[in-house]
Amino acid sequence: MGFGPRITISLTLVIGLIGASAARAAAAGDATIAPGTKITLANWAQYRQFMPDGMAVLFAGAHVWKMPADVEIDVGPTIIHPLPKGYVEATEKYSGQVRLEALPDGGHNLAGYMAGVPFPHPAGPDEGWEILADNWFRYAPHLAVSPPNHPITECTQDSYGNVSCEQEMYVDRWLSHVTDPGAPMTDPAADGRFETRFGMVVEPEQRKYTATLSIFYDDLTRLPAAYIFTPAERRVMQLSSGARCQPSGGGDMTADDYRYGFAGSIPYFSAQPLGQRKILALLDYAAPPGIFPATYDMPLGFPKPNWGKWELRDVYVIDVRKIPSQAEGYCYGRRVMYIDRQFYGALWLDLYDMKMRLWKTAHISPQAMEVPGIGVVSNAGSFSEQFWDLINQHGTYDSSFDAHGHTTYVNSQVPQTYNDIEKYSSPNGLNEVMR
């Protein structure tokens, strides 16, 4: 497109200014934003030191995707929900035995991990990779389900405002490294599986019953497996484990972008620390009734103020890249992740292409929710994500709450019919989709 080079230069300048601002913020040390502050287009530059680079780019307005004229971020107090007791106890018991192993191809692997935070105090020459491992094994309920009557929604939008949506049920299950009370650390049926993610289209009718299954393994060097069932074929097909860059379902998220910000095989990535910052995040919010675009500030598709208060969170910033031996043909040159220092979830992503142009930026909002028998946690299985493709002017919007504001069922809340490992955590189960 004719305006592409000008946009690239503008984004580069904006990111440079943001970097200088962040450096000044780090020097200031105790800089903060008072609760009650309202951030708008008129005053955003005063607070850009608290913004991920991609958020500041959206505020700067150098691209088709930019903050709406009426954008408003209402700042509230920072709320810290304690990590689950079982997860903390597992960290204390097992983290001392965790170690890194160097792989022949230049990557790292994890040895001795059982449960909890692998590296509660990341430091040293491998600090960045330790933070990435903490993100990979962050706490999550062992079972999270959005059934067909309360489906999740995924919508896409192009630069002309054309919107297309589909609704899905999903079942996310941890089979190993579990710390929830009453659940085994490793399920007897795990068979080397760490986590499985099942999804099936509920609407629209022409895609109904299309189902996918992703399997992540305890052996971190083993690439995730991916399967799909299509009603027209009436059979299950295994997808290539190495095809990690194909956008999913016409959206902007690749296979490595799922799992709340990163689903890549961590032994095949390096991670360098870029420092620690305070950034604005949306965690303690109510699921708004209605679905995209009704509950979003358009045309960007940014959360409206009625979702809830934003808060300042302490984050690690890491630069994640494919190791050189694996980098050929990969889609991203670098993935900058803003990872919460308290619960290790990603709150924002800045994704660069192989020419190191800012390609996509993504806002991730894991919703703080009550987990039965544990209490309120910040990564409880319900979420909202917005991915903006700045180069191709395309957007993707995911949320795990439905049109009535229903959120994900977790652990003992899950209807028994969905607590079926064979049906929802194995390729054979995909054969049962239409039966």
Image (cartoon, rainbow, N blue to C red):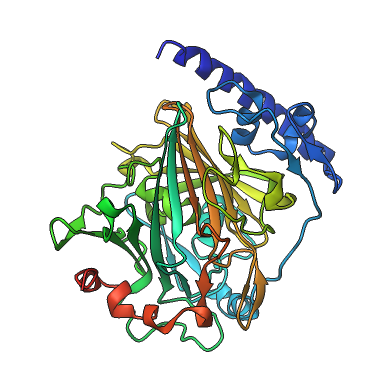
| Tally of marks | 0
Residue lying farthest bottom?
182
Which residue occupies the foreground of this view, 262 or 131? Answer: 262
In the rendering, at what x and y percent does residue 179 appear?
54, 80
In the rendering, at what x and y percent does residue 129 appear?
51, 53
Q: Decide if residue 108 is on the left or right side of residue 237.
A: right
The residue sitting at 74% across, 35% down in the picture is 49
Q: Is residue 106 above or below residue 9?
A: below
Residue 391: in sight, yes or no?
yes
Residue lying farthest top?
2
Q: Quadrant of the C terminus?
A: bottom left
Which residue occupies the foreground of this view, 99 or 419? Answer: 419
Task: Using the rendered view, name the quadrant where residue 12 is placed.
Answer: top right
In the rendering, at what x and y percent does residue 261 appear?
49, 51
The residue sitting at 35% across, 37% down in the picture is 331
Q: Decide if residue 249 is on the left or right side of residue 371.
A: left
In the rendering, at what x and y percent does residue 368 appear?
65, 64
Q: Decide if residue 245 is on the left or right side of residue 253.
A: left
Task: Using the rendered view, name the quadrant where residue 90 is placed.
Answer: bottom right
The residue sitting at 45% across, 47% down in the picture is 270
Residue 125: in sight, yes or no?
no
